[in-house]
Amino acid sequence: MAKEVRVRFAPSPTGALHIGGVRTALYNYLFAKHHGGKFLLRIEDTDQARFVESAEQYIIDSLKWLGLTPDEGVGFGGELGPYRQSERKAIYQEYVDTLVTNEKAYFAFDTAEELDAARALAEENKETFIYNWSTRGKLKNSLSMTEEETKAELAKGTPYVIRFKIDTDHTILLNDLIRGKISIDASTLDDKVLFKSDGMPTYHLANIVDDHLMGITHVIRGEEWLPSMPLHELLYTAFGWEAPEFAHLPLILKHEGKGKLSKRDGDKHGFPVFPMEWVTEEGTAKGYKEEGYFPDAVLNMLALLGWNPGTEQEIFTLTELADLFSLEKVSKSGARFSPDKAVWFNHQYLQQKSTEELLPSYQAVVKAHGIETNNELDAKVIALMKERANFVSDIFDQARFLYIAPSSYDEKAAKKAWKDDSKAILLAFVETLQSTDFNAVALHDAMAKFVEEQAIGFGKIGMPLRLSLVGALQGPDVPVIMEILGEVETVNRIHAMIEALSE
């Protein structure tokens, strides 16, 4: 029987979750569901200096909003926890001790000043300082010191880190599920720190130990971790463990110019780069949720940023994405983000949703404007206006006049629609309305009959009537507007404009 697929999303709680991180979570989720496996959430909070207290809950809330529910992890339970790295310190100590005992790692007592001096000397010689086989013998560590000297330093409580000892006489052969075969000369690598002086492991040690103990079969992460892959493979070998398969995802690129998409790009151009709003002392960064995006539209958009199903289809449910997803169809090169395409996806999802599905979120918008909701009216407005809307809030923006009578009239439109005879024509039409059923069909027929009887062009009644109801020369068909407003409101608005423009 094949081994169960187990993948993890392992963010650091150092700030808001970027949509690049969301895409990593999505691809892990899709891979797990495609193979009938498990998707884990692990919080990698070993970097205490950059830890942000609210970030962990933000990550959990974001995944819940998006519908990417982990099978195990922080906030979701599971039998292989704890899933928060700061709660696993004793576990890491045991494994780093094993590496030291087996001479795969060593103590380094160099101070920050001593390392700075070594870097400065290398620069003077036009070299790049690297802590490895070429320099470790001249630095202050348990490889250059005698066993007695090392024990003395430890006994004194001298601060130290533990570094991984990389053997240099071989080529490391790697296989990435997206990028293929990779070979690295071990002599070019540095002896990375595995354990810090604050008693916390670095990302490298904690990551490997956790993935092994949690049974992770595939590591799917961003390409910024590709340079760490040789070290991680060597660590698996040092422990005598079978390594998972690796896949490094391409970057999400700026919508214009070079480089990866950043918060600064979103701030500058007014689009979100975070799933949910992120509030700090410096200000508030936009979130897709608060900007009115549907979570399934965001996921659909992100899925196609770096992955191609090989067909022309663009709209997918999460289940369809999971059925089709494979790492073989993930691109090696970066994927360019498009704010316009994100809006397009939301428009498509809005059109697919029924009036009943949209009513609760639409009524939340109505209430936010201080207006009492009305199920019958609100449902009519959604059905009438949603075709041209990208967001639920757009429906209200386009239909505001159906709730609030115009208090002023577009100046350019008034010049076009209001003529010397407009008052008389409108008053005559009001009399016609008194004997007309207030439904769109009857009102359309009444307007047509009125134009014929008055021997005037349709614009003579159509334009001023629209201006009185909307305040501008825009909106849906006038008979439809009148039906929704009702007779009393329609007549009141006509009289209000006559009074305003006759002065």
Image (cartoon, helix red, strand yellow):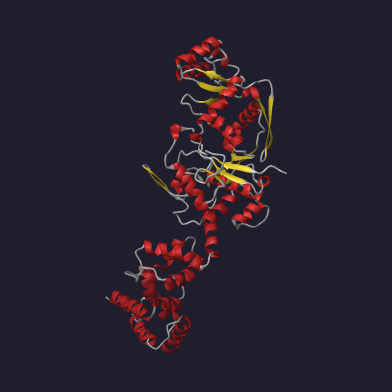
Q: Is residue 300 above or below residue 139?
A: below
Q: Is residue 410 left or right of residue 480?
A: left
Observer-nearest of 292 and 231: 231
Whole-percent x and y of residue 203?
54, 32
Residue 149 visible in the picture: yes
Observer-nearest of 56 and 503: 56
The residue at 55%/57% (across/down) is 345
Q: Is residue 310 left or right of residue 464?
A: right
Whole-percent x and y of residue 267?
44, 46
Observer-nearest of 239 and 454: 239
Q: Is residue 461 above or below residue 256?
A: below
Query: Which picture quadrant has residue 409?
Result: bottom left
Q: Is residue 450 above or below residue 142?
A: below
Quadrant where the N terminus is found in the figure: top right
The residue at 36%/82% (across/down) is 426
Observer-nearest of 79 and 256: 79
Q: Residue furthest left?
A: 503
Quadrant where the C terminus is found in the figure: bottom left
Whole-percent x and y of residue 246?
64, 38
The residue at 62%/32% (across/down) is 229
Residue 190 visible in the picture: no
Q: Residue furthest right?
A: 1
